[in-house]
Image (cartoon, coloured by chain):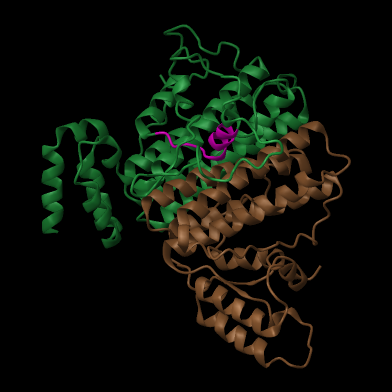
Chain colours: A brown, B green
Amino acid sequence: MSPLSNLRMSEPLFSNSFLARTLRRRSFFRVVGATVATSTLVLAGCNDDNDPTPTSSTPSLTLGSGDNGLLNYAYLLEQLEAAFYQKVVDAFPSDFTAEDKAAFVDLRDHEVIHREFFRYALGTNAYDSAGTSLTFDFSSFTLTTRAGVYAAARTLEDTGVAAYNGAAKLITDVTSLRLLAKIASVEARHAAFVRDQAQPGSFAATDVITASGDAAGLDTAKTPLEVVELIAKFVPATIVASSLPTI
Amino acid sequence: MHFLKLLARLAETDTESLTLTGPRRTALRRLAQAGTAALPAVLTALPQPAVARDSRTVQDVLKLALTLEQLENAFYTQALQQPLSFFGTTENQAAIQTIQGHEQQHVALFTRLLVNAGATLDLTPRFDFTGSKNGAQAALYPDVFTNFDTFLRVAQLLEDTGVRAYKGQVEYIQFDNFLLESAVRAHSVEARHASHIRTMRRQRGATVKSWVSPSDAPIATTGSVAAKAYAGEDSFTQYLAGNNLVPFVDNLPINVAKPPLSQAAILAKVAEAFDEPLDGLTATEVVSLFIY
């Protein structure tokens, strides 16, 4: 499924008329903010050549700036993880064991708790507080086999760990820093667990833990821009992270 | 410099803080060496100097991290001197080797950071992983290097304590991006180790999840020093800035299981979803079980 078709599926309540769609986008953009979104809208309005490429009509998802921007970033990551685990729990692979199932119910519950925690913390600052919810696109994963599911979980959890490790120095409020650290180590526990299931003994292998040099023995840290690039294929919107802190 | 002298005088007059945190003046000098970025943190740390949590210095943080890593490194190094029969399988042995390698790298990192900051390194502590203080008292774990299950229990205690200890220190180094990022990147490695040790224990029959859960079978006697490593981990209360309690109990739509979980069961999941910090004094107390 293309990101565009996913997005349309997630907007069933609105008329398909061009005017209605445009107005609705306008209000969405006002909430998530932003000049970048407005220019996208203008491009969409000018596009009359039936070009099916999703870029012209893909909405923008603007994370914002400062600590709220970082909390929106964490919120989006937790939404993504929660949606992934819910999808697996809704249709377990046929070769999943009882232990696999119990673990994935735990993982789903943890990520839903993280997601709702950030949604509550953000309140009206949540990028989707107007009610638009995204339907994530997991079509790049194989979710019909145990091996495929664990490989997918490994990708998402390692990304989450690297994202939290990179975000710590960017957050200003000390309470938020403490809370991110409380969640980060749970994500690292998840990552190690799913990695061990995907490949025994790979809980802290050299693809995630630096092997040599000054950062030897340290886990991966990624900037928001690096992470946004990694998760773009799952998200049916253009993620605008350019206002997030960088130092 | 004028107000640094003032701060140093304040520190000298605060005797309670001095006994809790040691050479505060030395650390202040190091903070000054670190540059102006350090100064706001000094200022914010001073209003309540008698409270232990507000009076830790960068040096305290780095020395606690180093001690933790030295302890873990020595623990795994000693285990790796045992024959393969101790581990049972080459996979188990390889996992301990992987973990030991990281601890050794963390020791090197925090040693380097302390030396670069101009600190005088303390002598490496003497360790006794049986908990007998070199025979001075009854051993807590007499078969730690002959019974792999005992070894894994102590490993879990050390790794879970390490995760909590790092988490308790991040706020004291928040002003220094490099130190903070180094610490959180070591923190998540400890969490990966803890998860793997827990998975190994579960595969050997222990009732324990890969994440800290109220449903884990306790590995420490109630009221013991080791039990302090887990005290408070079962909390399901989280506060945002401004003492704003996150309403997991009443309001948030977190109970998505079909059929829904009991309230006790969903709150146990909340406890699992957040690891809790451990303050420096308590972390030191747990670590001291193995130091003589």
Q: Nearer the viewer, residue B272 or B6?
A: B272
- Residue closest to the far top: B138
Picture coordinates of residue A81, whole percent (x, y) = 66, 52
Q: Quadrant of the N terminus of chain B?
A: bottom left
Residue at 24% x, 57% y: name it.
B39
Q: Nearer the viewer, residue A186 or A30?
A: A30
Picture coordinates of residue B248, whole percent (x, y) = 50, 40
Q: Nearer the viewer, residue B210 or B288?
A: B210
Compared to residue A36, the image places residue A188 above or below, namely: above
> Which quadrant of the figure has residue B152?
top right
| Tally of numbered tags | 0
Compared to residue A184, the image places residue B209 above or below, namely: above
Q: Nearer the viewer, residue A46 or B145?
A: A46
Q: Is residue B126 left or right of residue A116?
A: left
Residue A179 in sight here: yes
> Which quadrant of the figure has residue A73?
bottom right
Picture coordinates of residue A66, whole percent (x, y) = 42, 65
Would residue B27 be counted in the magenta stretch? no
Q: Quadrant of the C terminus of chain B?
A: top left
Picture coordinates of residue A23, whole percent (x, y) = 60, 81
Q: Main secondary structure of the magenta part?
A: helix
Residue at 66% x, 45% y: name it.
A191
Query: Which range of residues does the magenta coloring cover?
Result: B266-278
Residue A207 in sight here: no
- Residue closest to the far right: A94
Would residue B267 be counted in the magenta stretch? yes
Residue at 57% x, 35% y: name it.
B272
Compared to residue B36, the image places residue B20 above or below, namely: above
Q: Is residue B22 left or right of residue A153?
A: left
Compared to residue B147, the image places residue A42 above or below, namely: below
